[in-house]
C-alpha cells in the first residue's frame, strides 16, 4: 500500500542504467500484455544510475505507461516484500558481476527469469528460467509460460531451502576461512622447505 501497487505485477530491480536492459524489459512487457493477455502491471525499483535518457524516452511513449510503477530506491524490507508479492521477477541485465537480486528473489520463492549469459546462468542454474536478454520475444514467451503454470511458483518455493544452503553468508565465511588457511599452509610449507 505504501507504493500504491496492484495485487498482480511483475517485478524488476536494479540500478536504472543502460546495462540493466530496462528498455528491452519495457518492450517485452508490451508483448506480454498484447500477445499473452497479462493483466498485471510492471514494477521497476532501483536507484538512478549513469544514464536514464533511453528509459525516460521509452516510458514517455509507452502504450502501457499507466500500468508501470517506477519506484526508485527501496529499503531492504520493502524489497523483500516486493519479491514475495510479485508474480515473477525479471532480471535481464546485459552483464553482471555476481547478480544478487535474482538470487534474493529465488530464495524468497519467487519465480525468476534471467539471462543465460555471464555469471547469472552459473549462479541460478535450474532455479530460474534462462533467456536471451536481447530477444524481446524470448523474454515475453518465458514470462507467459511461467505465469500460465501455477506449479511453477510451487517449484520455486521448494527450491528456497536448497538456495539458502548453497548461498549463505555463513557458508561464504567458512569457505573464505578455508581458503586463507590453505594459503597460509602453502606459505608455511614453502618457508619451512
Image (tube, helix red, strand yellow):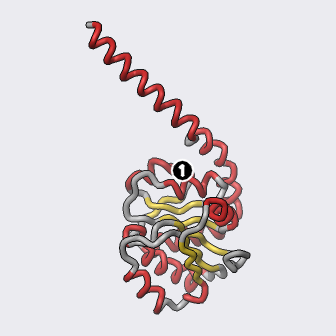
Dot 1 surroundings within 10 Å: few (below 14), some, or many (20 or more)? few
Give the answer, above or below, for where 180 lies relative to 15: above
- The total number of labels drawn is 1
Going by the image, does 1 lie left or right of 190?
Answer: right
Q: Secondary structure at mark 1?
A: helix
Going by the image, does 115 lie left or right of 36?
Answer: left
Going by the image, does 118 lie left or right of 83?
Answer: left
Residue found 55% across the figure and 83% down from its top = 35
Q: Position of residue 64 (x, y in %)?
A: 56, 88
Residue found 47% across the figure and 91% down from its top = 60
Residue found 41% across the figure and 87% down from its top = 57
Furthest toward the top, the residue is 193
In-front residue for pair 119/45? 45
Q: Position of residue 6 (x, y in %)?
A: 70, 79
Residue found 53% across the figure and 79% down from its top = 29
Quadrant for the C terminus, please: top left
Quadrant for the N terminus, please: bottom right
Give the answer, above or below, for where 162 lies relative to 144: above
Give the answer, above or below, for where 180 lies relative to 27: above
Q: Position of residue 88 (x, y in %)?
A: 61, 66
Going by the image, does 122 lie left or right of 104?
Answer: left
Q: Position of residue 65 (x, y in %)?
A: 55, 88
Question: Quadrant of residue 75 in the image?
Answer: bottom right
Q: Which residue is mark 1?
A: 126
Question: Quadrant of residue 162 in the image?
Answer: top right
Amino acid at each position: 500500500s505504501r507504493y500504491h501497487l496492484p495485487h498482480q505485477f511483475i517485478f524488476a530491480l536494479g540500478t536504472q542504467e543502460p546495462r540493466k536492459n530496462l528498455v528491452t524489459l519495457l518492450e517485452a512487457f508490451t508483448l506480454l500484455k498484447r500477445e499473452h493477455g497479462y493483466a498485471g502491471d510492471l514494477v521497476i525499483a532501483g536507484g538512478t544510475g549513469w544514464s536514464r535518457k533511453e528509459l525516460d524516452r521509452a516510458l514517455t511513449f509507452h502504450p502501457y505507461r499507466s500500468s508501470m510503477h517506477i519506484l526508485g530506491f527501496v529499503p531492504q524490507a520493502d524489497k523483500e516484500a516486493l519479491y514475495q508479492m510479485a508474480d515473477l521477477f525479471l532480471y535481464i541485465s546485459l552483464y553482471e558481476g555476481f547478480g544478487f537480486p535474482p538470487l534474493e528473489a529465488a530464495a524468497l520463492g519467487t519465480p525468476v527469469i534471467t539471462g543465460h549469459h555471464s555469471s547469472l546462468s552459473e549462479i541460478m542454474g535450474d532455479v530460474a528460467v534462462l533467456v536471451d536478454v536481447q530477444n524481446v520475444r524470448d523474454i515475453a514467451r518465458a514470462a507467459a509460460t511461467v505465469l500460465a503454470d501455477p506449479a511453477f511458483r510451487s517449484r520455486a518455493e521448494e527450491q528456497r531451502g536448497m538456495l539458502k544452503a548453497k548461498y549463505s553468508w555463513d557458508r561464504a565465511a567458512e569457505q573464505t576461512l578455508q581458503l586463507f588457511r590453505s594459503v597460509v599452509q602453502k606459505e608455511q610449507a614453502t618457508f619451512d622447505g
